[in-house]
Image (cartoon, rainbow, N blue to C red):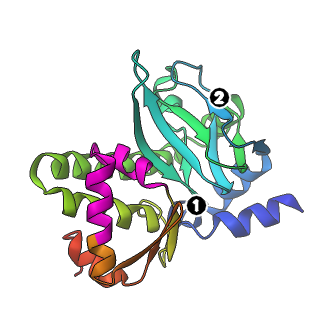
Amino acid sequence: MHTEKWHAQLATGHWFSHLPGSFQHSLLAHARQRQLAAGQYLFKRGDPPCGLYAVLDGTLRISAVNEHGKEAVLSQVELPYWFGEICLFDGLPRTHDACAVGPCTLLQVPQRALLNILDETPQYWRDLALLMSQKLRLSFIGLEHLSLMPASVRLAHRLLMIVEGYGDIQPSRSSVQLPQEDLAAMLSLSRQTTNALLKELQTQGIVRLGYGEIEILDAQRLREAAHAPGC
């Protein structure tokens, strides 16, 4: 059955695997699979709420574009990342664009179905609040780094977050499919500066650079470069 396969995939994530079994079952029972082609938008800023999503396969870019066409890339997310919960709490339009980097498979729990689940079992709201609070915590850390940390630390920290699934997977990934221009946009750095910093990490034997890919060779030293706890 599809739901059994979905459960196995999503159970690799900390948030989903720690949900009450009944909530896991309810989410998957009301879920439907969505396929996106490369470059296809799931939703755009200002679109109405359409539910909660999880990435099953491929990579999704979360970003925003201003009136002059300049793009701010917030993150690129993969299995088993869940997102879209903000609109559940406030009922307001989408805050950013979500676009498939390549072919992408997603799981969607429609807004109305999820609200019905929450009406029936209000204590599940806490589980969704935990999902949102984890992202809020990371956002505050990112803002602090932007203000206080040198570019080299910010870059190492962002790489660490991506390979750790923004705190949701263990063990971390060994590589990330990420063009350098996208990483630069996430950090508000120039492409040239980002390339120089990545080459320095490569020289130190911490990463290996490929075409559109960054392989992590030494996760512990990447943590040290990011000034992350547990070093």
Q: Position of residue 14 (x, y in %)?
A: 51, 66
Q: Is residue 85 above or below residue 162?
A: above
Q: Secondary structure at mark 1?
A: helix
Q: Nearer the viewer, residue 215 or 195?
A: 195
Q: Position of residue 119 (x, y in %)?
A: 61, 34
Identify the residue under disc 1: 16
Identify the residue under disc 2: 50
Real-space CA distance between mark 1 and mark 2, rounded to the nearest whole angstrom: 20 Å
Q: Is residue 196 above or below residue 174?
A: above
Q: Is residue 181 magenta?
A: yes
Q: Position of residue 101 (x, y in %)?
A: 61, 47
Residue ID at (52%, 46%): 123
Quadrant in the rendering for residue 81: bottom right
Horizontal relation, residue 30 to residue 160: left or right: right
Tell me if mark 1 has few (under 14), some (14-19) or many (20+) residues whose alpha carbon lies within 10 angstroms of its own: many
Q: Is residue 186 visible?
A: yes
> Which one is in front in this view, the residue at disc 1 or the one at disc 2?
2
Q: Nearer the viewer, residue 191 or 188?
A: 191
Q: Amino acid at mark 2?
A: Cys
Mark sitting earlier along the chain (1/2)? 1
Q: Secondary structure at mark 2?
A: loop
Span shown in magenta: 179-199
Q: Amino acid at mark 1?
A: Phe
Q: Identify the disc placed on residue 126.
A: none
